[in-house]
Amino acid sequence: MRNALPGGSAASRHPPATVAQLDLDRLLGTWFEVARLPNLEADGFWQRAVDVTATYAKRPDGRLGVQTVSYNANAGMRRTEVNGMVRPANAGGSKLVLTFFNLIRGDLWVIGLDPEYRWALTGTPSRRRLWLIARTPRLDPAEYERAMAIAAAQGYDAARVRPTPQGVAG
């Protein structure tokens, strides 16, 4: 029987492993999307998302909020902002649940993390979506390769990951 998931490796037959512990306080602040697996929301028919950031902040109710901002390079650099909530779904905090508009829910698992929280590798358990985010718009090539090696080892199609242009909107 053939494995339909990317790579067909043994890793892709099991859920991705997440980091043991995520300090949600260290997640706070702005992160730049350095790279992603192409997806419909960012790379759809008339969409090419650039200058993508996600800013995490504590809400008055104690939960985490996330504000995602991007610019559509295929639509005159039109700015899009989406606000949502984030909550941990496991004891270590590395399996996150995102909710947008109080009706769209998605799992976001942290599968790689720099010890100093300079970058994080996040993906969905299905392996259809993957994002490399960092505290700076670009990563050192060695760090980028380290993150892609983690993605590949976890069964994600790292060869399809594309850099996210930053500094385009001006």
Image: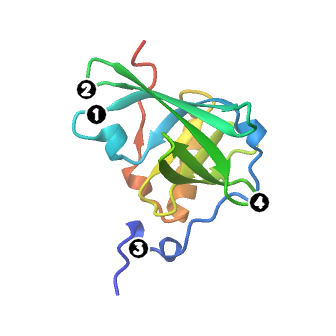
Which of the two labelled residues, at mark 3 and mark 2, occupies the earlier sequence position?
Answer: 3
Which of the two labelled residues, at mark 1 and mark 4, occupies the earlier sequence position?
Answer: 1
Which of the two labelled residues, at mark 4 and mark 3, occupies the earlier sequence position?
Answer: 3
Distance, label 1 to label 4, CA atoms, is 36 Å
Q: What's the residue at 46%, 40% (across, down)?
A: 35
Label 2 with label 4: CB-CB less than 8 Å: no
Q: How is the protein colored in the picture? A: rainbow
Distance, label 4 to label 3, CA atoms, is 30 Å
Label 2 with label 1: CB-CB less than 8 Å: yes
List the single residue furthest toward the top.
Answer: 170
For badge 2, the amino acid type reads Asn
Labelled disc at residue 91: 4
Q: What's the residue at 41%, 73% (across, down)?
A: 8
- The image shows residue 53, relative to residue 152, as above or below, that is above
Distance, label 2 to label 4, CA atoms, is 41 Å
Labelled disc at residue 8: 3
Q: Residues within 10 Å of mark 3 (few under 14, many from 20)?
A: some
Q: Which residue position holds label 2?
A: 74
Which of the two labelled residues, at mark 3 and mark 1, occupies the earlier sequence position?
Answer: 3
Q: For residue 116, say whether it is visible.
A: no
Labelled disc at residue 47: 1
Local secondary structure at mark 3: helix
Q: What's the residue at 47%, 47% (across, down)?
A: 103
